[in-house]
Amino acid sequence: MNGHYNQMGIRQKAVSRAFTVLKGTGLGRVMAPLTQGCGAVFMMHHVRPARTGDFQPNRHLEITPDFLRQAVDRIRANGYEIISLDEAVDLLKSGYGHRRYAVLTFDDGYRDNLDIALPILTELQAPFTVFVATGLIERTSELWWLALERVIAENDEVVFTQAGEESGISCRDAAEKNTCFERIVDYLTLEVGELDQRKIIRALAEKYGVDLAELAESLMMTWDEVRQLASDPLVTIGAHTHEHYAMARLDSSSARADVLKGMKILEMELGRRPKHFAYPYGKSHAVSLRDADILRDIGFSSSVTTLPGVLQSSNARDPMMLPRVSLNGRFQDPAVVDQYLTGAPFALYRAARWAASGFGVRSGFSRLFPSTR
Ligand SMILES: [Zn+2]
């Protein structure tokens, strides 16, 4: 078990080393003319002060207020103008190529986006988009990854039923807790369907005394708060489904229904139909070309994934599958932002994935670009 945890540490160090090499050798700069692209859509989730403790399996989903400021500074220092998603999609489609632009986006609808990110981005005059999953605002959908974190954090053993077989998973220290978290997440996101995933998490939360509605209440905005955020001229509200299911893992009509439900609730609550969409999870297991067709058919003008990358002129052909640059909370270093903007880490990531797939191994870059929510 420790081996797995150490392996994570090693992978993380390898990624940090890769950034140091990119920066030290200037390789990123050398590659930039080929890999840079015309812009970048940044993805964030929470903005809040760092928490202490060794067991933080969702740490990649949060950055500090300081790092948000630093990231905006670095984006601008690299010659990128921070613009709204609307404007970026127009520029991308027009193919008007000599302006470099960046878009800031936040997924899910966390209250810290209003309380912490908004004042900072107002001061810096940087527009941004928040993709809201309406079921989380109504406290009926499940923040399952955070509920699971809490169950494991608060217990020394978690009894979990996997494929009909019940077993106790030891969770006495951070290493064991991380292993347990990864094992259950893999099961919930790869082996069971989305509806079963939620049934399992509800049962687990009930068994270990985690109140899912209370968890959402403590972290997600209320409708009044979403309206307050939406009324700010810097802010665009985008859609993120209702239930926050991985679209590609639903049948076509269920996927479409969940998107429509989220869109209609936003329109009803905010008086404006959202034009932009973010796929929940947004990685290859969660996004498919079928889903891009559904979104185009519904009438969205863009959809963003979490597939890592910068915007290239080729993305104009399909703005329903835009890549994003995740500001990963495990690598909160302003120099990393410079490297992202060269596009080089993504080109290397794709090359490493391609090479790794030939040998059937997992590339070390999975630590840099982990599954997000
Ligand atoms: Zn999400």
Image (cartoon, rainbow, N blue to C red):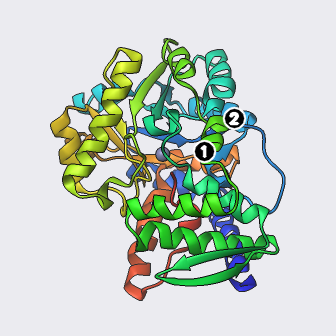
In contact (CB < 8 Å): disc 2 and disc 1 = yes
Give the structural element (helix, strand or loop) at label 1: helix
* Spot occupied by residue 9 in the image (x, y as percentages of width and height): 72, 72
* Spot occupied by residue 102 in the image (x, y as percentages of width and height): 47, 33
Q: In this view, does 89 lie to the left or right of 281?
A: left
The residue to which callout 1 is attached is: 337
- The residue under label 1 is which amino acid type? Val
Q: Is residue 332 visible?
A: yes
The residue to which callout 2 is attached is: 70
Decide: few, some or many residues near mark 2? Use Cα within 10 Å; few <14, some 14-19, many ≥20. some
Give the structural element (helix, strand or loop) at label 2: helix
Which image quadrant for residue 315?
top left
- The residue under label 2 is which amino acid type? Gln
285 w.r.t. 98: above or below? below
275 w.r.t. 133: above or below? above
Q: Is residue 133 visible?
A: no
Residue under the point 50% across and 17% down: 227
